[in-house]
Image: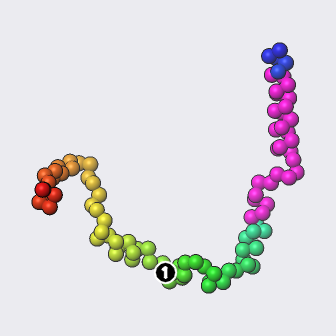
């Protein structure tokens, strides 16, 4: 009985693989890449339809300018060779009752 069930299952699985791999409806997507690239070149979107208008105000160095502006707010990176400093756990004068 187990051998018979295994045989039926194997036949069903092998038919599924044959029908899926050899079907005419399956494509890999590579066939569509040229068509989609041509479609993207012809259908341009107006700049006014973008939700983020600041995109057009950026230039090649905008990221680095923002990075330099925000550097002063960043915490220093921890060094694995230096142990962490102990925390001050004493209550502050405003917290004492």
For residue 76, above or below residue 4: below
Examine the rendering and report whether any part of residue 36 can be seen.
Answer: yes
Residue 55 pos. (x, y %)? 53, 79
Return the residue found at the far top: 1
- Name which quarter of the figure residue 46 lies in: bottom right
**Which of the two residues, 31 or 4, is positioned nearer the viewer here?**
4
Residue 90 pos. (x, y %)? 13, 52
Examine the rendering and report whether any part of residue 85 can be seen.
Answer: no
Q: Using residue 74 as the reference point, say whether residue 14 is left or right of it.
A: right
Return the residue found at the far front: 97
Name the residue: 85% across, 25% down: 8
Q: Using residue 12 as the reference point, say whether residue 54 is left or right of it.
A: left
- Name which quarter of the figure residue 14 lies in: top right
Name the residue: 39% across, 75% down: 66
Q: Using residue 96 as the reference point, say whether residue 20 is left or right of it.
A: right
Q: How crowded is mark 1: few (under 14 residues within 10 Å), some or many (20 or more)?
A: few
Q: How many labels were placed on the picture?
A: 1
| In magenta segment, residue 24 | yes
Name the residue: 54% across, 81% down: 53
Quadrant that contains the N terminus: top right
Quadrant that contains the C terminus: bottom left
Residue 79 pos. (x, y %)? 26, 52
Is the magenta region chiefly helix, strand or loop?
A: helix
Query: Could you tell me which secondary element the residue under label 1 belongs to?
Result: loop
Q: By what rule are the colours in the image chosen? A: rainbow
Q: Mark 1 points at which residue?
A: 59
Name the residue: 80% across, 16% down: 2
Residue 96 pos. (x, y %)? 12, 56
For residue 10, above or below residue 61: above
Looking at the rendering, the stretch of residues picked out in magenta corresponds to 6-33
| In magenta segment, residue 25 | yes
């Amino acid at each position: 009985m187990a051998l018979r069930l295994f045989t039926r299952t194997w036949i069903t699985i092998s038919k599924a693989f044959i029908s899926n791999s050899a079907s005419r409806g399956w494509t890999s997507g590579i066939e569509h890449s040229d068509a989609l690239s041509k479609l993207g070149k012809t259908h341009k979107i107006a700049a006014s339809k973008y939700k983020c208008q600041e995109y057009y105000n950026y230039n090649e160095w905008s990221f680095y300018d923002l990075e330099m502006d925000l550097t002063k707010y960043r915490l220093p990176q921890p060094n694995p060779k230096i142990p962490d400093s102990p925390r001050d756990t004493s209550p502050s004068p405003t917290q004492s009752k």
